[in-house]
Image (cartoon, rainbow, N blue to C red):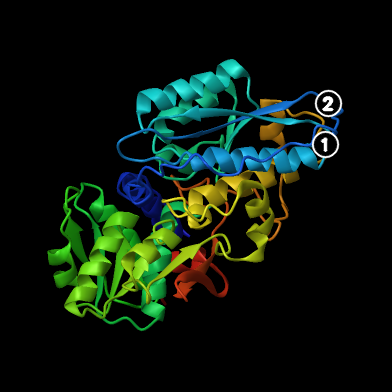
Amino acid sequence: MTDQISRRRRLGGLATASVLLLSLTACGGGDDGKDDFAKPKQNADVTFSGDPIKVMTFTPYDTDTINFKAALDVADGAKVAINNAGGINGHEVVVVPCNEGADPNKAADCARKAVDEGVSAVVGGFSANGDTILPILEKAGISWIAPPVISAAELSSKFSYPIVPGVIAQAGLGAKAAEDGCDKVANVMYDLPSSGSVKELGNVGLASQGHAPATVVPVPPTTTDFSSIAQEISDYDCAIMSIPSGPLTGVAAAGASLGSKTKYYAFPGTLTDSAISQAGGALDSAVTMSPFPPSGDAVWDDAKKIVGDMSSEENGGWSYMSYQSTWVGYQLLAEVLKDSTDVSAAGVKAAFDAASAVDGLGFTPELSFTQEFPAPGMNRIFNTKVMFHDIKDGALHQDGDYVDLGASLTPAS
């Protein structure tokens, strides 16, 4: 028992130290340059029996670095779908959008706007500024449903309700590489102070299969020519890629030109349809993991009908995890509150705190928000089940059934 507690505390410490580096794997999206998604239409004939439930979705756009404005199209489409079905127990959903600008000050402004607007919850969206946002939401008693899980606060705050596995995915990738028979494994990551912690999480996964630790291949954050990185990892069977989509594509393309046979294990959210297309076949042997079915699965058909297929969205459209998580977050909000009469911020939190057998609606296995993950600093991870995705015919496809990442955190006996 003492060993288990010690290991859980150590894992929690590794997770807290890792979020900065892993947050960078979710950044670096280009300006999507698109405002032409089909805008969903709400049926004016639908009537509602209760007061509206107001929620906020924020995301960065019109910046020089990351632009994920399509998250607002997804939120708007989810709102219309729910309202056209009668709302949430008769309450019309109203979405308050906010541009958090990839800036902690603007993110704080969005959080304060959520308080001023009296929203009942924040749902989905994207921000790398969760440590700024959540203290403001907490003070006002506002929950964040389906956050992207790239800040320490999202992993620990009692007002955070993630539906993705967060940093423990790093251990899952290590375990998968070992299971696949990889001999020499590299862990490619940005050269930052938190790199050591990310390396350790990957090594925990490798150790769960009795494998030796990976060799870290550091990437300076300012790197634009990835030839030397590709050359270095070409001596390895496999590489865990803890870097954003752009560098992932750059390394793969450079590796292909060298004739490299290295297999890539991409961190969730980085191996998108657009990355696969841009790599021109260089990522065809790569694998990744996700808590959700791939974007080509029929479970996304209703979302595509109302929002559009987003095939021209440069961040990956429906294959981008934060867009998926935003849609699913709204569906779970409606599912958890379907019998609720109190849709205030306090009512939303109470309903989620009591939700022990939530239907994942085909997007995830059954979820429970009543049982926290038994590791300090990672306690708000509620979904440890993922499926692996590989590439067929230039698109992501499901490879096998769900697996529980909890096993990748347990050393081999």
Q: Nearer the viewer, residue 15 or 322?
A: 322
Q: Which of 377 and 238 is in front in this view?
A: 238
Sequence-first tag of 2 and 1 = 2
Q: Do the residues labelled 2 and 1 touch (CB within 8 Å)?
A: yes
Residue 89 - label: 1
Dot 2: element: loop
Q: Where is residue 156 in the image (x, y as percent from the top left)?
A: 48, 40
Give the alpha-carbon distance from disc 2 to disc 1, as whole Å: 8 Å
Residue 267 in view here = no
Query: 328 left or right of 386?
Result: right
**Disc 2 crowd, CA 10 A, few/some/many (<14, 14-19, 20+):** some
**Quadrant location, the C terminus:** bottom left
Q: Is residue 118 above or below residue 62?
A: above
Q: Which residue lies at the image location 39% right of the left edge and 66% below the top edge?
A: 276
Q: Where is residue 85 in the image (x, y as percent from the top left)?
A: 81, 43
* Amino acid type shown at disc 2: Gly
Report which residue position mark 2 lands on. 50
Residue 318 in view here = yes
**Disc 1 crowd, CA 10 A, few/some/many (<14, 14-19, 20+):** some
* Amino acid type shown at disc 1: Asn
Dot 1: element: loop
Q: In this view, does 70 lie above or below 110?
A: below
Query: 351 left or right of 294?
Result: right
- Residue that extends furthest to the left in the rendered view of this protein: 228
Query: 410 left or right of 29?
Result: right
Q: Where is residue 19 in the image (x, y as percent from the top left)?
A: 35, 46
Residue 242 - label: none
Q: Which residue lies at the image location 42% right of the left edge and 35% below the top edge?
A: 60
- Residue that extends furthest to the top in the rendered view of this protein: 116
Q: Nearer the viewer, residue 193 or 93?
A: 93
Q: Position of residue 363 (x, y in %)?
A: 64, 58
